[in-house]
Image (tube, helix red, strand yellow):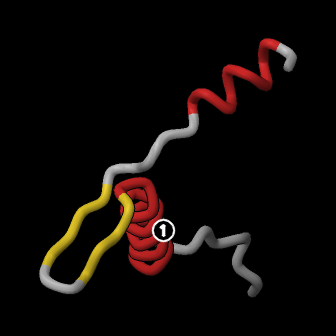
Amino acid sequence: MSGAFASAVNAVSPGIYLGWGGFVIQLGNLIVIIAMLVLFALALFLPFPHGRRRR
């Protein structure tokens, strides 16, 4: 195996899982979901850029 591929294969490990009751999610997926929700909220609440007004 090439060096880069072998190091990539060795880097694969089981992720960190968080559980609450019957709900289990991987930490990486939870971070992505939270980031998407934050961006969605910012898109809703930040003012839309206005162009030049027509008279």
Foreground of the two, 39 or 22: 22
On the image, which quarter does residue 50 sit in?
bottom right
Circle 1: residue type: Met
Q: Would residue 6 appear left or right of 40 to someone viewing this image?
A: right
Residue 37 percent coordinates (x, y): 41, 73
Query: Is the C terminus in the top left, top right, bottom left or bottom right quadrant?
Result: bottom right
The residue lying at 56 percent from left, 74 percent from top is 48
On the image, which quarter does residue 34 sit in?
bottom left
Say whether residue 1 is visible.
Answer: yes
Q: Characterize the local packing of mark 1: few (<14), some (14-19) or many (20 or more) Cα atoms within 10 angstroms.
A: few
Q: Residue furthest left?
A: 21
Q: Would residue 45 appear left or right of 12 to someone viewing this image?
A: left
The residue lying at 78 percent from left, 18 percent from top is 4
The residue lying at 76 percent from left, 83 percent from top is 54
Q: Would residue 16 appear left or right of 1 to someone viewing this image?
A: left
Which residue in the protein does label 1 denote? Answer: 36
The residue lying at 33 percent from left, 51 percent from top is 16
Q: Is residue 3 above or below residue 46?
A: above
Q: Residue furthest front?
A: 1
